[in-house]
């Protein structure tokens, strides 16, 4: 009888110790719901991520002055052609990205010319109540024997149109 009593009492203890009452379950569900509501509110406050495509195989024309650096919106093919030229290369992916200015606009990020391997990265584009907010990082790398002028061209659907505000994070 002792052999049955001890395992049975241990099993019974475990059942009561691990049991979850209905009130505990309800409190847990309410807590999870509140957390999800707070997360949703924070996402609205942080803005909506705007999808974009990075245009490939374009370069800044040599006639564009250095004072034209920064981030700005381009809404027509004529404006685009004043600043950029196509740079097709051989291979399957060598053609420049097609841009349809009837349905899209371009956000151009042009950095100053440098011989320190400049790059534009960590691009973030969000839609807030007051317009589009663009954040990006400019970095300078090792010294090169030539200068280059980095550019990033973001192709954005016109449904996300709005005034553009940008912030540069520079790292040297």
Image (cartoon, rainbow, N blue to C red):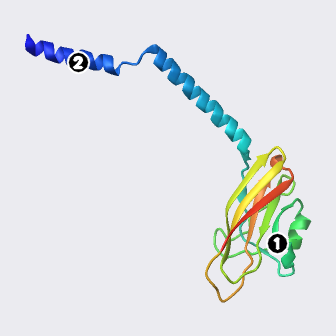
Q: In percent of the image, x 76 and y 64: which residue is there? A: 153
Mark 1 or 2 closer to N-term? 2
Between 26 and 80, which is closer to the camera in this rendering? Answer: 26
Corner quadrant of residue 100 = bottom right
Q: In percent of the image, x 76 and y 80: which residue is there? A: 113
Contact between labelled residues 2 and 1, with CB atoms less than 8 Å apart = no
Q: Which mark is residue 69?
A: 1
Image spot of residue 45 (x, y percent)? 73, 41
Label 2 crowd bin: few (<14), some (14–19), many (20+), radius 10 Å:
few
The quadrant the N terminus occupies is: top left
How far apart, in angstroms, are the residues tagged by discs 1 and 2?
74 Å
Image spot of residue 21 (x, y percent)? 42, 15
Which secondary structure, mark 2?
helix
The quadrant the C terminus occupies is: bottom right
Which secondary structure, mark 1?
loop
Residue at numbered disc 2: 11
The relative height of residue 88 versus residue 29 in the rendered view (above or below) is below
In the visual, does 32 lie left or right of 158? Answer: left
Q: Which mark is residue 35?
A: none
Image spot of residue 10 (x, y percent)? 21, 19
Label 1 crowd bin: few (<14), some (14–19), many (20+), radius 10 Å:
some
Image spot of residue 75 (x, y percent)? 88, 59
């Amino acid at each position: 009888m002792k052999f049955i009593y001890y395992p049975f009492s241990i099993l019974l203890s475990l059942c009561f110790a691990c049991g979850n009452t209905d009130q505990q379950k309800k409190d847990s569900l309410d807590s999870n719901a509140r957390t999800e509501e707070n997360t949703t509110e924070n996402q609205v406050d942080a803005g909506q991520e705007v999808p974009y495509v990075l245009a490939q195989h374009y370069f800044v024309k040599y006639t564009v002055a250095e004072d034209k650096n920064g981030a700005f919106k381009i809404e027509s093919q004529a404006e685009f052609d004043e600043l950029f030229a196509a740079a097709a290369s051989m291979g399957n992916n060598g053609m420049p990205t097609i841009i349809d200015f009837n349905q899209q606009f371009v956000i151009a990020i042009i950095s100053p010319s440098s011989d320190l391997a400049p790059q534009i990265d960590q691009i973030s584009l969000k839609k807030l109540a007051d317009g589009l907010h663009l954040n990006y990082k400019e970095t300078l790398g090792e010294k090169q024997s030539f200068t280059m002028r980095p550019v990033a061209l973001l192709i954005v659907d016109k449904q996300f149109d709005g005034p553009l505000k940008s912030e540069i994070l520079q790292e040297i």
